[in-house]
Each structure stands twice: as C-alpha cells, then as structure tokens.
Image (cartoon, rainbow, N blue to C red):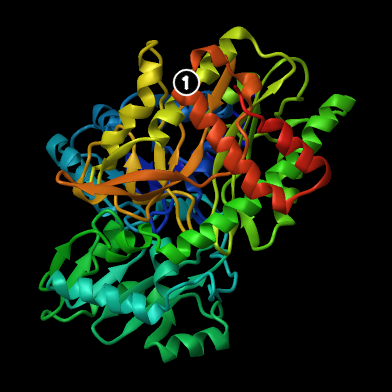
Amino acid sequence: MDTRTSPIRVRLERLRDALQHHGFEAVLVPSSDPHLSEYLPARWQAREWFSGFTGSMGTLVVTRARAALFTDSRYWSQAERELAASAIELVKITTASATTHIDWLVSRVAAGQVIAVDGQVIGLSAAQGLRKALDKAGVALRTDLDVIDAAWPERPALPSAAVYEHRAPEATRTRADKLADVRKAIAEQGATHHFVSTLDDIAWLFNLRGADVDYNPVFLAHALIDAERATLYVGRGKVPEAVAAALAEDGVQLAAYAEAPAALAALGKESVLLIDPRKVTLGMRERVHGAVRVVEAINPSTLAKSRKSDAEAGHVRRAMEQDGAAMCEFYAWLDQALARGEPITELTIDERLSAARAQRPGFVQLSFPTIAAFNANGAMPHYRATVESHARIEGDGLLLIDSGAQYLGGTTDITRVWAIGQPETQMMSDATRVLKGTIALSRARFPRGTLSPMLDAIARAPLWSSLLDYGHGTGHGVGYFLNVHEGPQSISKVVPEPQMAMEPGMITSVEPGLYRPGQWGIRIENLVLNVPAGETEFGAFLEFETLSLCPIDTRCLDLARLDASEIDWLDRYHRAVRERLSPLIGGDALAWLVRRTEPVD
C-alpha cells in the first residue's frame, strides 16, 4: 500500500494539523482511558485508530515530522506487520523500563517546544515521570487539552450498556459489608474520603457488573466514598430503577458520570483524600484543591478483591469444571474433524471453542480474545487471527490455544499446545522445557507474604539452564467474574513492591513459554489458588492449588526429559482432571478425556 494515501497516514496528518493549530510539537497517545483500563472502550482506542496497531499494550508518539510506536517483545512481530503501511517507526522495548518513549521524545523535541498529552487518560505516576524528564530538557508539557478530538471526527460516543447486579449465591458478600471494610481502611489511613476510578474495583465494591468494556464485565464509573455516603458517578440511564433502589438502601447515591471531577474540586480544606497514585489520572488529581491533604496508598478494594474467600473459591472451582467440560467437547470435535480432513482454520477454532463455552451453565462472555495460533503464528504471544490473515490447521506442527471465559462464579484463562500430525523433535524438546517450568512453579511452597516477583525464577529455571527465556511475565492475578488481569500480585521480572505479597485466596496464572520467531510458540498455562501449606517455627507457608482442568497433550512432549517427580505430577493432575470432568460430559467428549488423561507410566 502507498503510505502516502493509507488511512493511517491520513489520520496522522489530521493529528499533525491539530498540533500545528495549537502550537504543539508533539503529542503522546497512551493506551489508556480515564480509568487506566487495560481493555479500552472504543472511544479511547486512539492509539489503535491513529497507528493501526491492535495490540493491547503500546504507546504512540507523533511529532510534526515523525511518528513512533513503542511496545514490548510480545507484540514485535504483530506490530511490524500492522505498521508496515503506516510510515510509523517501531521502537522495541527490550526491558521493563517505562521511559523508552520519553527518552525518544526528549531526543527529538527542542527546548522551549511543547508536548501535549490528555491529562484525563494519563496516570498520575506516569505523568509525574514524564514531567520530570521534560522539565530537565526544558520542554513544556500541556495536559489540559485533548488534541485527539479535533483529529478524530469519527470518534465513538461513550458506551451505554446497562448496569446489573452480581447476586448471590455467586456474590458471597454484600456491598454493605464491603463498603464497611473499605471505610475502616480509609479511617486507618487517616482519611475522610476515598476516590476510586478503576472499573474492576468499583464493580467488585458495589456488587455490580456491566458491559462497557469488551471481555471485562465492568462499566464506566467513578466513586467517592466517605464515612457515611458513597456516590457512584455513572452515565444517566445506565442503572435500572430497581438497581438504583437497591443501591440507595445501602447508602449509595447516583450522580452523572461527568460530575466526578467537580465533586473532587468541591472537597473542603478539612478533607483528607485517599487515592491510589497508580490508579488515578493526572486530570482527576489536578481537580483536588491544594488545601486538601492527600494520602497516597493502594486502593483498599484492590487488596480485598485479590483475596478470594473460601466461598468464592468454591464457585471458581465449579466454573473451572464447566470450562473444562466445554474444552473437552471442543477438543473431541477438533480431533475428529482433523481425522476426517475437514478444512479447519484458526478462525474455526475460535468460533467452535467459544460456542462450546457458551453452552455451559453460568457463562456470560469470553474473558479475552481467543488466541488460536498454528506454528509460526504461535511465536507471537498475543497473536489474533483475522479474516484477512490466518492459518489453516494442516500438516505437522503445534497448535497453541490461549482462551478463557467469564462465568457468574469465576474467570478462566488457560493455554494448551496440541500436536498436529507429528511435531518436530525440537518442538517436543521445547514443549517439555516449558512444562517443566509450569510444574516447578505449580508445586512450589513459599512463606506467606513472599513478594510475588520473587517466584518468577522458579518457572524460568528449566529454560535458563538451556540458555532460553521468554519475554512476558510468568503470572498475573485473575479476578472473580472480573478482569482476567488484576493485581496486586505479579509473578514477573518487575521490581518487587510491598503490596505484591502473596496471601491466601489469591488466584494467579502460571504460564511460562518459549517462542521461536517464524517457527513456533509454546505456552502451558494454568490458574492456581494460594492455599495454606502449613505452619512451622519458620512461619506460615503457602502452596498452589491448580484450578484449571484440561489435559496436557503428552504427544507434544519428550517424556524422557521429565524426571520421576514430574511424571508423578502430570499423572496426578490428569487423574484429577478425569475425576472432576467425567460427570459433566459423555459420548465422544468423555472418550477423548479418558484417552488424553491416561497415565504416562
């Protein structure tokens, strides 16, 4: 495509016209919204609109002369393909550093010039780092104008889906109890008010769910809580009368979504406001009057919702069983369809697996876009098949499927690799190393309060021993019928922080991988639950209960590379999978399950 007439080039020229109109030299376009969400409503997908890059993580910087997109190794291959016709430079982020785009900007913008970013969508912490670097370089920063609006006439409106209640029995605690606990935490911080913008925190705290963000059952809102009242700032007409009445009974009043900034501005000088600096935007923070004392600490709800109760864990186990049953139905069909020589593509897999899940009790929606990636496509960790670009499943190799769903009683996320035909010896060797990492971390024991990043090396060690590694984190927290990615825990190479301590009830993914660009990719992922392992004179210890229920394809493995303890873990896991899923399926699916869970030894 001629980049001079490509849609992206035209959009960038509109954006540069807006820069020139305001006298700005550059604009920073983050992957963000006023709630600092991972998955964005269409209105705030500006980075994708102006770059064409569809990955979930990335930052676009546009100057009057150049444009660059910054993303990490999970998206390099995807970004190279999607940016090919855009004249946008791909800048590869090779470390966990978040300042690459800032360094790029500082080196290309002269002192005295002005850079713009919408203060309503950039996080407070990120904005503080940006401002510090620009001040040092003598570059001005404007955050009070959204230059995107003028350059995006087709910009979507705010979503309008209705809000609904998450009810018992899946909602195991009342919102009155949750609000009481949060108010106690507010008081312990010496604060009188607490402002919350993160959508999963709000959904959890008020026992509400919505459909404003794809794959996450949340809705656009802000909340302001004091010792007696809680105000939910949400779009007019989104909360049905019956839900509004139930909220009022619990002391929750409704206000227009757009009124949240004014509410912050109206706080009196006697107020003490608790905010999480990583979960609030610069624009919101700047509305708080200078006379108001601000306490910066993690949102109390973030810690509380990460620690699932025993009752919630019970619902999650049942959701995992339904999810596993759906996968058995799908994989039984897949094996038969391949044997019959039916034409199957990555798109077919997405459609059939999603349909199987939709038939299970409690299913609401998928928890993220299904990744069905054959051979070379599997080397892109966040690959997504499209009508324009996808592979047919034929010949020999490995099929990676990363998928999950939202159920009323839990959120699932699981990755498996499957043998298609006869995998190469090197593929089997790689898959075995990855499984060794999954097993090593899955059976780890560690002191309660261990900072989650410290566990990362356990999963990587079997790969590191062969001078191999992977570019993404090993594990992320998972919500309870909420976001598939949640904190505060993160099993990764990030710098540990106190709030990342592992506590009972946390659900985390275990997903080491190995990717050979242009050849294949492997990832074996289960969700695990922190449970007590016992207490000694050295303190209380935790271990993982594996929650995900789906066979691991032994045809992909070089079994000779597994030691006796690893074979035992695999056999015990498969025995549990068979015992728990067999009552939920029959016929071909049951036969498939029995075949795929036969003991290795």
Vertical placement of 352 versus 66: above or below?
Answer: below
The residue to which callout 1 is attached is 564
Image coordinates of residue 154 in percent, x first then y, are 59, 54
Image coordinates of residue 224 in percent, x first then y, are 31, 76
Count numbered badges in the picture.
1
> Residue at horizontal 62%, vertical 49%?
580
* Closer-to-camera residue (365/578): 578
Q: Amino acid at mark 1?
A: Ala
Asked whether residue 194 is in view, the answer is: yes
| Image quadrant where residue 238 sits | bottom right
Q: Secondary structure at mark 1?
A: helix
Vertical placement of 40 versus 550: above or below?
Answer: below
Using a 10 Å C-alpha cutoff, classify the residue at mark 1 as few (fewer than 14 neighbours), some (14 to 19) or many (20 or more): few
> Residue at horizontal 55%, vertical 24%?
522
Q: Quadrant of the C terminus?
A: top right
Vertical placement of 317 versus 220: above or below?
Answer: above
Q: Quadrant of the N terminus?
A: top right
| Image quadrant where residue 462 sits | top left
> Residue at horizontal 30%, vertical 30%?
100
* Closer-to-camera residue (123/412): 412
Image coordinates of residue 446 in percent, x first then y, are 27, 40
Asked whether residue 264 is in view, the answer is: no
* Closer-to-camera residue (451/263): 451
